[in-house]
Image: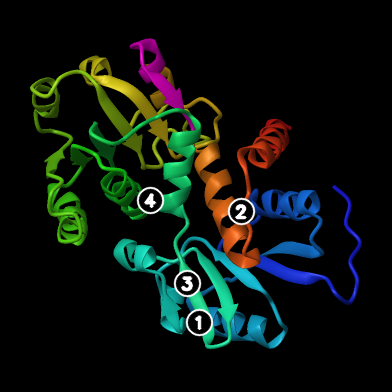
Amino acid sequence: MSFEINARTQLLGLLGHPVAHSVSPYLQNHLAEICGLNQRYLAFDIADEESLEDAVWGAHAMGVRGFNVTVPYKKAVMEYLEEIDPVAEKIGAVNTLKWEETGWHGFNTDMPGLLRALSYDGVEIKGKNVVLIGAGGAANAALCAALEGGAAQVLVLNRTVAKAEALAEQFGGAYPFVPIRCMSMTDDFVSYMASYGKEWIALQTTSVGMHPDVNGLPVKGEEFYDHISVGYDIIFNPEETAFMKQVAAHGGRAFNGLRMLLFQGIRSYEIWNDVSIGDDIAETVLKGMQEALRK
């Protein structure tokens, strides 16, 4: 990629801690180059929450066009926003900021990013049984995507049922016609799944199996994987997780989280620039991201 930085270059960025591992600068700068926009995207490591407010308002003072926000500030940054998109309100977290005349506006692109990734890979959620693994921060967007996508029902699996139930309660009111069942990893969830057939879509939202613990499995037991027709892991390093290997070994289709990252980043880019990015451009950027991660 080649850029000419000049006095008209627009600045975008990422706020989080840590951010040195992020592939977002590659993604966003590549998009800007392909689309011919004079923009530069940088990652800013904000060491503590006390510095977050200074970063947000300092960025506006310098004319920054917009930001992505990553852990641990997706909730904390909402305090400084003039307006929050309804999807971000449901999820309770913001990962994209855009400056408007009235102030910073917040969006969550994780949910639409996941839905577009599923569609890109030919996975249809509507009318399907979905099992959500985990009830942490990443599970919010995944559950919202399953409900928004029209799942027949969602089974939330987590080590503690109370946390899963809190997640279900958060979204239940907005989607009253989709049953959400919560079970712990020690419950007989396999029998429950079997009673609804063998075609389940699994959304894996925990960090189990992420580098360097590449052999970790979020759900143990062969029988579980017999019921999974599609397994989507939010992890993209390693490229093929132990969870994905199990899904594939039992005849299911398995995908990692790189496309979700790609499409949530694309949605942020679309918000900042009021454009629409097609799958042809997405495919070009995806190949570049894959090559960069393999180096």
Asked if residue 231 is positioned above or below residue 26 in the image, the reply reads above
Answer yes or no: do the residues labelled 1 and 3 have beta carbons within 8 Å?
Answer: no
Residues packed near mark 1 inside 10 Å, few (<14), some (14 to 19) or many (20 plus): few
The residue segment tinted magenta is: 247-256
The disc labelled 3 sits on which kind of residue?
Gly
What number is the disc on residue 192? none
What number is the disc on residue 138? 4
Residues packed near mark 4 inside 10 Å, few (<14), some (14 to 19) or many (20 plus): some
Would you say residue 14 is visible in this rendering? no
Does 18 lie within the magenta span?
A: no
First along the sequence among labels 2 and 1:
1
The kind of secondary structure element at disc 2 is: loop
Residue nearest the viewer, comparing 114 with 61:
114
On the image, which quarter does residue 223 sit in?
A: top left
Q: Is residue 199 left or right of residue 205?
A: left
Structural distance between the alpha carbons of marks 2 and 4? 25 Å
Asked if residue 218 is positioned above or below residue 54 in the image, the reply reads above
The disc labelled 4 sits on which kind of residue?
Ala
Asked if residue 220 is positioned above or below residue 108 in the image, the reply reads above
Q: Which residue is mark 2?
A: 276
Measured from the top left, where is residue 167 in percent x and y?
21, 55
Structural distance between the alpha carbons of marks 3 and 4? 17 Å
First along the sequence among labels 2 and 3:
3
Q: Is residue 215 left or right of residue 170?
A: right
Measured from the top left, where is residue 105 in percent x and y?
50, 76
